[in-house]
Image (tube, rainbow, N blue to C red):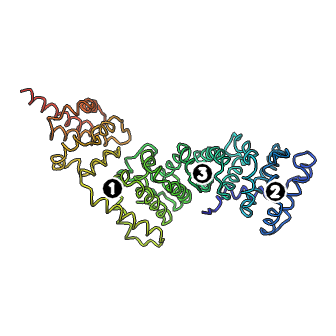
Amino acid sequence: MALEAPTYLASLQNNIRQRPIPWEGAVRSGLVTDGQLALIRAIDRAKKIEEKKATIENDLASYTALFAGNRADSRASVFETAAKQPAMVQYLLVLLGDIVEYAPSLAKSLLRSDDPYHPFRPLIGNSKTLDDPIPLLTAKVLTSLMASARDESTATQRALPEVLTYLSGLITSNDASKQDIAVQQFSTVLYSYKTRRQFWEQRDETVKPLTDILRAAAGVGSQNTSSLWSGSANIRSGADSQLSGGVGLQLLYHVLLVLWQLSFEASKVGDALDDEYDIVILYTQLLRVSPKEKTSRLIIATLWNLLEKNQTSLLPTAVLARLPSLLDNLSGRHFTDPDLLEDLALLQELLEEYTQTKTTFDEYVAEVNSGHLRWSPPHRNAMFWAENARKILEHENGVLPKLMEIMAKPWDQDKAVLAIACSDIGWLVREAPERRHQLEKLGLKKRVMELMAEADENVRWESLRALGGWLKYSFESSK
């Protein structure tokens, strides 16, 4: 998918193209040879794209050696010989980037050469500042080379991690123009299973900063999930082109595009995406406040990929996030994109089939397994606890250990989770007092007692109520 070059990068490239380069002096200094200069000038003399393309393709071996070198006859790449002249290196990087666009055959030829990335590694790896244009232009060239040739060679697999690491540094820079450049280059290289796999393996560098951008756009911090679960976050800020957290609409679209591409591997990464990044609830909130049809299209398409391939694990989370009712509301909008409409219908059908077969008990278990509790109807429904308390205590996949795991966390950003957990424990004690030992063995009584000292009054109240049940039945049994 071709994306328009970010303004910052396009402006930088145009400025470099217009700079005069003292080529004759470079030849005298040994920075380039007469033969290399002749090849460069042949491209410059050709005015039309078709002429430039023909010039390259008619002498493909020479242009391959110009940029990649030739180890067989000890010819160095022009990037190596001109390395001491940054202005010249910048010009050559822009030139090569342009050539790859109109003569993709050169990309394939370069990547067939011996150690094709050797001339570029020093250019991308030695930068001390993100403002240095050389590594930025190098990353652009390398991602274009890889994507143009759709290369999956061993050499590309070795070089890709270094490129991804550099681009991730741009994303964490908080410079919106550099962030958008990096995100677009991410999108460029996600053209195959192997590149998407490498992208996922480096997810702390690649996926995490992207989800941080999405969380900022959704109006929540990287640690705060309570507003996501409540649906209270607000994506909009004052300007139409800016979203919550200062995220631009274009950057949001490009981040969503990258994660949509990653979702092609949903069967392999879907569960971890949700476990590590709360992707289903995050995307549900983003869909709720999506500002444009094009962003809604990518959100819905990604949710379809994830949920369809991970139905057992992710559909319960989608229901807890109230995605079905949101989709029902969206179906009343006048969308025009046929792909969006198709994926919307498929998602609705998938979720309807799931909800028709699930009971309130299933929903409660799914909520506990999600690792995040909210005041959903079962928690305060006496009939639910009367019917299901013993089922919960006997649940084969272990609801109680998961409940203890939830209670063990401090939940500094969402104390309601602790209050809800204490309330649940209280119901279990009241409905099945003879099973108190089972709760005590897991450490739940001890944790409830600890929570009586919490600063949050709701947590203190619910922990006191739960402990009161213990004391009541302990006293009665001692009579």
Q: Which residue is mark 3?
A: 179
Camera-side residue of 356 and 122:
356
Q: Which mark is residue 229?
A: none
Give residue 428's position: percent from left, percent from top. Answer: 19, 40
Q: Which residue is mark 2?
A: 61
Circle 1 Cα neighbour tier, 10 Å, few/some/many (<14 / 14–19 / ≥20): many
Asked whether residue 242 appears in the rendered view, the answer is: no
Q: CA distance from mark 3 to mark 2?
A: 36 Å
Give residue 193's position: percent from left, percent from top. Answer: 56, 53
| Nearer to us: label 1 or label 2 | 2
Q: Quadrant of the C terminus?
A: top left
Circle 2 Cα neighbour tier, 10 Å, few/some/many (<14 / 14–19 / ≥20): some
Query: In the rendered structure, which disc, 1 or 2, sits on the residue that comes first in sequence?
Result: 2
* Direction right: furthest residue: 28
Where on the picture, by quarter, is residue 95?
bottom right
Q: Which residue is mark 1?
A: 319
- The amino acid marked with disc number 1 is Val
Circle 3 Cα neighbour tier, 10 Å, few/some/many (<14 / 14–19 / ≥20): many
Residue drawn at x 25%, y 35% is 460
Q: Is residue 310 above or below residue 413?
A: below
Query: In the rendered structure, which disc, 3 or 2, sits on the residue that comes first in sequence?
Result: 2
